[in-house]
Amino acid sequence: DIQMTQSPSSLSASVGDRITITCRASQSISSYLNWYRQKPGKAPKLLIYAASSLQSGVPSRFSGSGSGTDFTLTISGLQPEDFATFYCQQTYSTPYTFGQGTRLEIK
Amino acid sequence: EVQLVESGGGLVEPGGSLRVSCAASGFTFSNVWMSWVRQAPGKGLEWIGLIKATTNGGTTDYGAPVKGRFTISRDDSKNTLYLQMNSLKTEDTAVYYCTTVSKTLYYFDYWGQGTLVTVSS
């Protein structure tokens, strides 16, 4: 199975900040990497697919990059609704594994 | 508007069985791959398995923790996805989400609100 490791596990920031979350795969996954945001008590929401493609309706402050084993999610200009948990996911091969999550908290 | 509505969760004893459902609307269900993902209380996301569209053979794939115990099926005439869970263990306690799956890049673009399954004596 492909292991996905996110860093950091938690992060404190302020509204308006720019932050970056990193996701590393245990083997090459090409660009089969997706990012989700999950607000407390809610279902996850797709933000970025195929490493860098913005899902329809998602604000442009979200961007993704990377290929192979190393990927990043950047949020430029944090909004109050972004204080949530973010997950990466590989869909290169089954089982489709998720990272352990990055919890973004208000500073 | 795409909607996925899970139902059927509840309390079940260890070793028992439960079937949860996911009613889909707002898209052509028969053409879409579907998946189940679960989340134990306070934990991260875990992929359970998927079922391809009937036009793609309707085949299934499962994660190791549930293989042989859980079965994913679909009824295209009812626009409904099912997850049959047998030989339940306490570690199966989780919120279960159904999702749509992109056929090309396999991302999970729409999610239901989830249904809670609690396995406890």
Image (tube, helix red, strand yellow):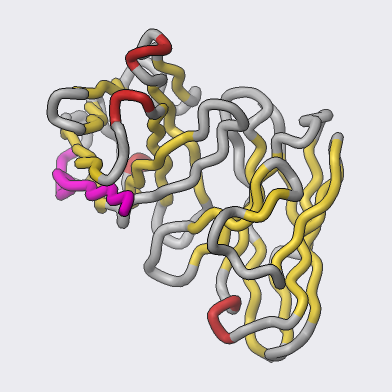
Q: Is residue A103 left or right of residue B56?
A: right
Q: Nearer the viewer, residue A82 or B10?
A: A82
Residue that lies at the very extreme toward the top in this rendered image: B57
Residue B58: x, y in percent? 35, 13
Residue B42 painted magenta: no
Against B48, residue A54 (above or below) is below
Residue A31: x, y in percent? 77, 36
Q: Quadrant of the C terminus of chain A?
A: bottom right
Q: Quadrant of residue A6?
A: bottom right
Boundaries of the magenta span: B1-13
Residue at the (47%, 57%) spot, across then down:
A44
Q: Is residue A41 left or right of residue B20?
A: right
Residue at the (23%, 30%) spot, across then down:
B82
Residue at the (25%, 25%) spot, across then down:
B87
Against B55, residue A47 (above or below) is below
Q: Is residue B1 left or right of residue B66?
A: left
Q: Quadrant of the N terminus of chain A?
A: top right
Residue at the (50%, 58%) spot, across then down:
A45
Residue B12 painted magenta: yes
Against A17, residue B69 (above or below) is above
How many numbered circles are shown?
A: 0
Q: Quadrant of residue A22?
A: bottom right
Q: Nearer the viewer, residue A72 or B83?
A: A72
Against B97, residue A36 (above or below) is below
Q: Nearer the viewer, residue A69 or A5?
A: A69
Give the overall secondary structure of the magenta segment: strand
Residue A23: x, y in percent? 77, 50
